[in-house]
Image (cartoon, helix red, strand yellow):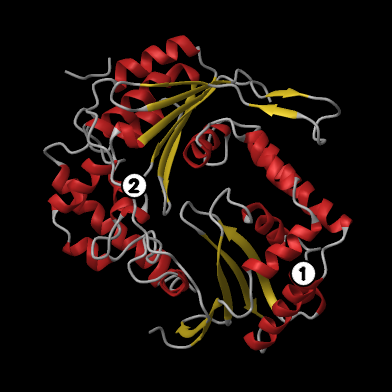
Amino acid sequence: MRSFIISAVVLALSGAAGVQGQTLSVPYTQFKLPNGLNVILHRDTSVPVVSVNVWYHVGSGNERPGRTGFAHLFEHVMFEGSMHVPEGEFDNWLEAAGANNNGSTTTDRTNYYEDLPANALELALFLESDRMGFLLDDKAPDKINGQRDVVKNEKRQSVDNQPYGQAFIELPAMLYPAGHPYSWSTIGSMEDLTAASFEDVARFFRTYYVPGNASLVIAGDIDVAATRKLVEKWFSDVPAGKPVPPINAPTAVLDGVKKKTITDRVQLPRLYLAWLTPALLKPGDAELDIVSNLLAGGKNSRLYRRLVYDMQIAQDVNATQQSAALDSNYLIIATARPGQSLDKIQAVIDEELDKLRTTPPDAREMQRALNQIEANFFRGMERVGGFGGKANQLNSYYKSAGTPDYFQKDLDRYRAVTANDIKAAVEKYLPKDRRVVLSVVPGEKK
C-alpha cells in the first residue's frame, strides 16, 4: 500500500570567464532502475532548493491521424490526482510546501517539473511516481472527460479566439505532408478528442507514459546517495510497461512555394514565411539560430532596423529556428503597420535574405550575435529549476544528444560557426523558391 506519511557548475578556465577556451562541465550521476526509468542527479548547493524534472519522450508527434491531441490532454490529466493522491490535492500539497510546478507539451516530448525547498524533495518524488504508475485509477474516465472540456476551452482561448491563432493550425499542414507527425498542431483536433473513447486515450497513456520512455532529473541541494535511495523507494514499484514503438515519419519536402491567405478578426495584416530546416543538433541548426539573431535579434538586427525603425512599415518582426527531433522549420513573422502591404514587407525580407545569400555578415555583427547567444546560454545555467534551468536542460540533452552533460559541445556548435557558414546556410536552407507563404488579413473569420 502506497502512502505518504554558479555553484555546482564546474568551470575549468584557461582564461577569464566567458571566453573561448574554457571547459564547461555540469557533473551528474546517472543510473537506471530495473523498470527502465533513467535517472540523472546533479548537486548544486548554491541555494537550498531542488528541481524535480520529468520528461516523457512522447509528444504530439507520437499521435496518429484521427487520434490527435492525446499528449496535450495528458499534460492536463496528470495534475488531476492519481490513485493515492485525491483530486485537487496535487497542487494543494505542493503549494503548502512552498513549491511551484508546471508542464508543457511539444511535438517530441511532454515535461513536468516541481521547484521546491530541498527539505520537501520526497513529496515531489511521491507525487511524480504516483502519477507515473497509478494515474488511471477508478476515477480516470471522469478525470479524462473533464479535461477534454478544459482542453477544448483552451483551444477556444488560444487558437479560435486568439488573434492570428489560426496561423499555427495552418502552418504545420502547409509545411508537412498529410499524415506526417508534425502536420497537426500540438493542441490537436477537438473532433478527434471528442470521438476518442476512454480506452483509446488510456491505451495512449499505457503505451508512452512508462518508465522506459521517461527520464527523471533531480538537480539542486541534494545528497546524491540519499536521493538515489528515495528514487528507488518511490519509483521501483512503477510497472515497466512494454517497449515504445518508433515513429515512422514520411519525408517532408517542399518542392515549390505554397501560398495561402486567410481572414481573421484582426486589425493588421501579418505575414508568415516558413521553411523546412535541419533537425535539432544537426548541421545547419546552430547556423540558423545565429541567422535568427542577425535578422531579428534586437533593435540593431537587420529586419528590425529596416522594417520597424527605418521604413516604419512593420509593427514587429520575429525570426526563429524551431528546432525539433525529426526536422525543424524556420519561421519569419512580420506584422504590418496600418496602411502598409504585406507584399512590400515580403520584398524587404527577401532583400535582406538575398544579402545574406551573397555576402557574409561582418565580424562585428557575428560577434554581437554570438555574445547574445552565449549570454542567454549562461543565464539559463544560473538556476536549476523552471523550463529554462539546468534540470530541464540535462533532460533535454539526454533525449537529443544521448548524454546529459552536452553543455560544452552545445556552446561549441555556435562558436564554430563562421560568417561564410551563415551565407551557405541561408542559401541552402532558406531558398526563395521552396517555402510557405501565409498571409493573415483582416476580415470575417473563416
In the displayed structure, 184 sits above or below 372; it is below
What's the residue at 49%, 19% (across, down)? 118
Question: Picture coordinates of residue 72 (x, y %)?
Answer: 34, 53
What's the residue at 35%, 67% (across, down)? 156
In the displayed structure, 387 sits above or below 249; it is above
Q: Secondary structure at mark 2?
A: helix
Q: Nearer the viewer, residue 298 or 428?
A: 428
What's the residue at 25%, 36% (across, down)? 81
In the displayed structure, 330 sits above or below 103; it is below
| Image quadrant occupied by the C terminus | bottom left
> In the image, 210: left or right of 311?
left
* Sooner in the amino-acid sequence: mark 2 or mark 1: 2
| Image quadrant occupied by the N terminus | top left
Is residue 197 visible in this depiction of the protein?
yes
Q: Residues within 10 Å of mark 2 (few under 14, many from 20)?
A: many
In the displayed structure, 364 sits above or below 443; it is above
Q: Which mark is nearer the camera, 2 or 1?
A: 1
Question: Picture coordinates of residue 198 (x, y %)?
Answer: 14, 52
What's the residue at 13%, 56% (across, down)? 197
Q: Which mark is residue 356?
A: 1
Q: The residue under label 2 is which amino acid type? A: Glu
Q: Mark 2 highlights which residue? A: 75
Kindly indicate the quadrant of the structure image that contains residue 130. Answer: top left
